[in-house]
Amino acid sequence: MKVRFDASGEVLVVTGGAHGIGAALARGYAAAGGTVAVLDVSPAEELDGVEGIEQYRTDVSDRDAVLTAVGKIVAAHGRVDALVAGAAVQPRTPVVDTRPEEWRRTLAVNLDGVVWSCQAVLPHMIEQRSGAIVVFASGLAHMGRAEASAYAASKGALIPFAKSLAAEVAGHRVRVNTVFPGVIDTPQFQAANPTGGEREHWERTTGIGTPEDVVGPLLYLLSEAATMTGSTLTRDRAFGKG
C-alpha cells in the first residue's frame, strides 16, 4: 500500500536542514506540495534551486536570530504549519577533556536551539489553532556512549521538554512529538564514527539507514493522520538491513 501525503499550501520550518535527514525531509515535503524554510548555519548546496525550498542562514543557539528568521518566513507566507527541530552538534570528547565552551555550545545548539525554535513558531500556531512540532531525540539519550556525554545529555533533556510542551499547547490544537530516527548515514554520523570498526558495529547491531528512510515517518508525524501528541516514534532498526 502506498501512502501519499499532501502538504499543499503548508509551510514547514526545518532547523539543521542543510544536510542529512533535514535536507531529505525538505525535498520530500516540497515534493508533497509544501513550502520549506531551512534554518542552518551552513549553506545547503544540494538544495539550491529546488522548488519550494528557501534557505535562511541561522544559528539556532541565537534566540534573536531564530525569531528574526521565523518572522521573515511568516511575513512572506502568512503562516507556519510545522517545525522539525533537527539542528545538532555531536562532539566526541571524554568528560575529563570537555572544555566549558564545548559543553555550553552542545547544549546551546541541541537544547536551547529547540526551545528558541518552538518559541518562534508557537505564537503563530496558537493563533492558527493548528500546528505540528517534531523534536529529534537520540537513542544515546537512553543507552549512552563513551565520549558522547554532552550530546547524550542534551538529547535526553529534550524528551521531557517535548512531553511537557505537548501538554502545554494541546488545548491550542498544536501537536508536539519526538522522533528517534535510528542510526542514519549522515555527515554527522560519519564524523562521530570515523573508524571502520565503529561503522561495522552499527551495521551488525541496528543496520544503517539513509536520510530518505526517515522522511516517511516524519511526514506522517507532520500530517493530520498522526492524531497523537507527547508521543515518541522510534526506528529501532534499519528495515531490511543487517
Image (cartoon, rainbow, N blue to C red):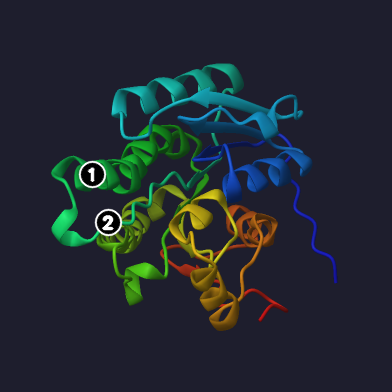
Q: Looking at this view, is 79 or 156 the one in front?
A: 156
* Gap between marks 2 and 1 measured at Cα: 9 Å
Q: Position of residue 176 (x, y in %)?
A: 44, 55
Please report the residue visible at 33 percent of the width from the left and 59 percent of the height from the top: 155
Q: What amino acid is at disc 1?
A: Glu
Q: Quadrant of the image for the C terminus?
A: bottom right
Question: In this figure, which residue is indicated by the disc labeled 2?
Answer: 93
Label 1 Cα crowd, 10 Å radius (few <14 / some 14-19 / many 20+): some
Nearer to me, 56 or 29: 56
- In the figure, residue 212 lies in which quadrant? bottom right
Element at label 1? helix
Tell me where residue 69 sits by quadrant. top left
Residue occupying the point 75% across, 24% down: 49
Q: Which residue is mark 1?
A: 102
Tell me which amino acid carries mark 2: Thr
**Tags 2 and 1 in contact by the CB under 8 Å rule?**
yes
Q: Is residue 99 left or right of residue 220?
A: left
Q: Residue at x 30, y 29 (%)?
A: 63
